[in-house]
Amino acid sequence: MTNFAQLVNEDLRLAILRYLSGFASYTLSVSMLHRALVASREFHVTADQVMANAEWLRDTGLADIEDLGRGKFNVIALPAGREVAAGLATRRGVTPYDPSQG
């Protein structure tokens, strides 16, 4: 059975991919992602939670992480991640996006 934390992580992963897909470079820093997610008022997460889910996305081939040094990281949506963000594909562990839902 799916637990609440797992559902939140699945929603968070989709939100990360959708934010990244909104930029021409498909790239945002973890700190900017964290601020955007918290500002949306949909997620009450820490930067560590954002990073952990970005790592999950990297490990599943949906995103990449660029180490900028000094504890700073960029997250980049890969083509497969952009397809999931657009609702053109699904991936287990990420809430499916339905474009008709907005």
Image: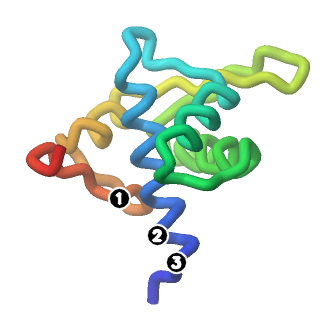
Return the residue found at the far right.
70
Instruction: State how far apart marks 1 and 2 are (Cα).
Output: 8 Å
Please identify the quadrant where the N terminus is shown.
bottom left
Return the disc, 3 or 1, that comes first in the chain's sequence: 3
Instruction: Determine which of the numbered discs, if any, sits on residue 4 in the image.
Output: 3
Binning the other alpha carbons within 10 Å of mark 2 as few (below 14), some (14 to 19) or many (20 upward) gives some
Residue 3 position (above or below residue 31): below
Residue at image coords 47%, 52%: 42
Question: As shown in the figure, which amino acid type bears the numbered disc 3?
Answer: Phe
Q: Are marks 1 and 2 in contact (CB under 8 Å)?
A: yes
Taking the image as shown, residue 14 lies to the left or right of residue 54, namely left
- Secondary structure of the residue carrying numbered label 1: loop
Looking at the picture, tell me which residue is in the foreground, 92 or 13: 13
Which residue was labeled with disc 2?
7
Q: From this viewpoint, which residue is outermost toward the left?
A: 100
Residue 38 in picture, x, y percent from top left? 58, 43
Q: Are marks 3 and 2 in contact (CB under 8 Å)?
A: yes
Q: Which labelled disc corresponds to residue 95?
A: 1
Task: Indicate which disc residue 79 carries.
Answer: none
Amino acid identity at mark 2: Leu
Q: Looking at the picture, how far across and down is residue 12, in whole percent? A: 49, 52
Indicate the colouring scheme. rainbow
